[in-house]
Image (cartoon, grey):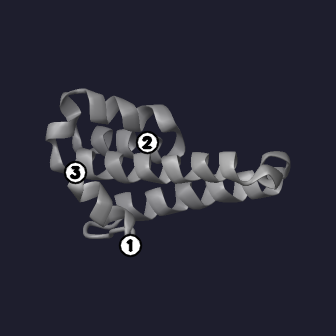
Amino acid sequence: MSKFGEKLLVLTAYLFFVPSLYIILTDRRHDPYCSLHAAQAFLLWIIFLLLYVLIPDMRYNLIILISLWVSITIMGFYTTTKEKARIPLISNLAEKL
């Protein structure tokens, strides 16, 4: 896969939950760049889903849901465009996965 294709796949992992699972569950996990970003995206989505389940008011507030999704997307876009960018706390856990 080309460098552009890898970045596009990683960015979609931050946008949607399923591409992060695809990277983790296939041979793409052997690529250090893809595996780190897939693990980070996966952890961010897990945190998002836990917040959704644990905070009842969040389920009905569309503004909060959209703002959390946009923040995940912005973090993903930032970390995929910068060479050595890491998300604090999340990247440490992602490296252990």
- Which residue is label 2 attached to? 13
Residue indicated by mark 1 = 88
Q: Is residue 54 above or below residue 83?
A: above
Secondary element at image label 2: helix
Amino acid type indicated by mark 2? Ala
* N-term mark: 1 or 3: 3
Query: Badge 3 is on which residue?
Result: 33
CB atoms of marks 2 and 3 within 8 Å: no
The label nearer to you, 1 versus 3, is 1
Is 14 or 53 nearer to us in this picture?
Answer: 53
Asked if 28 appears above or below 57 in the picture, the reply is above
Q: Is residue 91 left or right of residue 47?
A: left
Alpha-carbon neighbours of circle 1 within 10 Å: few (<14), some, or many (≥20)? Answer: few
**Residue 71 shows in this picture:** yes
Across and down, in percent, residue 75 comes to: 48, 62
Q: Amino acid at mark 3?
A: Tyr
What secondary structure is found at the residue carrying circle 1? Answer: loop
What residue sits 24% from the left and 45% below the top? 35
Residue at horizontal 28 percent and vertical 29 percent from the top: 25
Q: Residues within 10 Å of mark 3 (few under 14, many from 20)?
A: some
**What residue occupies the far front of the structure in this picture?**
54
